[in-house]
Image: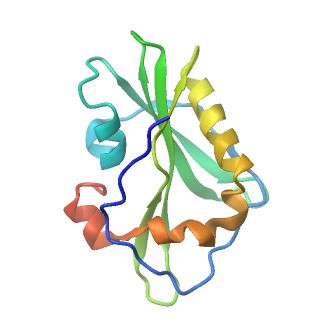
Amino acid sequence: MRTHSTDGKAVRIESRVSSLTGIYWGPLAPFEAKDAHDELLKSIEGRAGAELMTATVFDRESGAKCGRYDVAVDASSGDGCGMYRSIMLEPSTGEIHDLATPPLWYQYKDPGDVVVKVHKFLTDMQFFENLDAFTHHAIDRADAEEKGQIH
């Protein structure tokens, strides 16, 4: 499993972030490298033919969109890399933050396996129940745009 560097600026979000009581996601769909997080692109650098896919994530209780799983798969090696990503609005300031987990690597048979494995890892560490504990990894919109993470 690989992790990413935390070279982005850390942001302290003063308002509490709501936990998610459960999530579900839709089918994976292809997406372009220009829409991928820089850390995901760094993770697949040098892997010719890696395919990018994304699945929208919804809150089980409200049905509201609450993020996405971005996945890169390398069919030649059977390696798959995935991350959870969410654009969050801080209500008190109106600032938008890009929250992304490190890309995590797994062996896969089907690209959906990567989503399931990333989700299990995050669920086991209670990531979705304690989102406000992880928001220090968020960067503000200006930094995300400067780094090419928002298009």
Which quadrant of the structure image shows residue 42? top left
Residue occupying image coordinates x 49% and y 37% = 82
Which quadrant of the structure image shows residue 40? top left
Horizontal and vertical percent position of residue 57: 61, 48
Q: Is residue 28 left or right of residue 124?
A: left
Residue occupying image coordinates x 30% and y 55% = 149
Q: Is residue 137 left or right of residue 33?
A: right
Q: Is residue 100 left or right of residue 33?
A: right
Q: Nearer the viewer, residue 93 or 134?
A: 134
Q: Is residue 49 above or below residue 101?
A: above
Q: Nearer the viewer, residue 148 or 133?
A: 133
Residue occupying image coordinates x 51% and y 90% = 92
Horizontal and vertical percent position of residue 117: 64, 33
Q: Is residue 11 above or below residue 84?
A: below
Which quadrant of the structure image shows residue 127? bottom right
**Residue lying farthest to the bottom in this orientation:** 92
Q: Nearer the viewer, residue 136 or 32?
A: 136
**Residue lying farthest to the top in this orientation:** 76
Residue occupying image coordinates x 73% and y 63% = 129
Horizontal and vertical percent position of residue 41: 30, 39
